[in-house]
Image (tube, grey):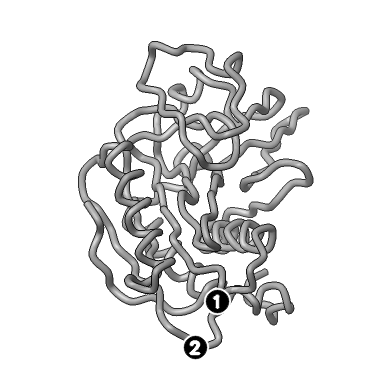
Amino acid sequence: MLADPLNSSQRRLLREDGRPVEWALSSGYVDYAAAEAAMEARVAAIAAGEAEELVWLLEHPPLYTAGVSAKDDDLLAPDRFPVHRTGRGGQFTYHGPGQRVAYVMLDLNKRGKDVRGFVHGLEDWIIGALDRFGVEAGMREGRVGVWVERKGAGWSREDKIAAIGVKVRKWVSFHGISLNVEPELDHFGGIVPCGITEHGVTSLVDLGVLATMDEADDALKSSFQQVFGPVQPGVAPL
């Protein structure tokens, strides 16, 4: 997988100058509107050459977000949790405790200026992190995100374990990924996740992998460096 030699598209995601990305973690649950405002400020500073790239790890309290392609009919329980309309790509998704959100603010001017390649890089990053737990995951044609195949006696299905929704401004990315470590999976029932009705949602713990959030973070950091290059300690915006 990611241990294989990088192809030309993957190599373009690495900065030629080797400058490390700041890696920061917020404790507690971070308010969504405040996080979005902090991202906006950081992205503007990166675009102006006044701040370093940043990956910001956090958890939110339970909430739903609607991307630019969200359909109102896919919000099945509008009064269950707060709903935030946002400018990221994609449709409805859920964020909440037990889910690792990583907001990815990278300067794509220095990483190939290829949005599709960047999204594939995010998928590779998550797949590599899951591989460290022995979870075989992959991409699916026409479905953004990361998926696992589940099988039993006489049945099989595909479930989504990680979502991706990004926005790019002046070739600087923001928003990012969410990896289900141990969220309340029934909380996804208030929406049609990403507008897809025929597939389910899962998590590491649901798959029988009793990983802690710290262990998930370590796997994400290790895999990120294989795809996007080195990291250094940073300060969380909130």
Q: Quadrant of residue 97?
A: top left
Judging from the image, what secondary structure is the residue with disc 1 in? helix
Q: Amino acid at mark 2?
A: Asp
Residue position marked by numbered label 1 in the rendering: 110
Q: Position of residue 11 (x, y in %)?
A: 65, 79
Seen in the picture, residue 190 relative to 224 is either above or below; the reply is above
Report the Cα–Cα distance between label 2 and label 1. Answer: 9 Å
In the picture, the disc for residue 218 is none
Left or right: where does residue 11 sit relative to residue 46? right
Q: Position of residue 155 (x, y in %)?
A: 75, 29
Three-letter residue code for mark 1? Lys
Asked if 63 appears above or below 15 in the picture, the reply is above
Q: Is residue 197 left or right of residue 14?
A: right
Left or right of residue 161: residue 9: right
Question: What's the mark number on residue 17?
Answer: 2
Q: Check contact, mark 2 vs mark 1: CB within 8 A.
A: yes
Q: Nearer the viewer, residue 173 or 156?
A: 173
Q: Position of residue 150 (x, y in %)?
A: 67, 38
Residue drawn 58% across the image and 74% down it:
111
| Residue lying at 54% horizontally and 54% vertically, measured from the top left | 168
Within 10 angstroms of label 2, few (less than 14), some, or many (20 or more) residues?
Answer: few
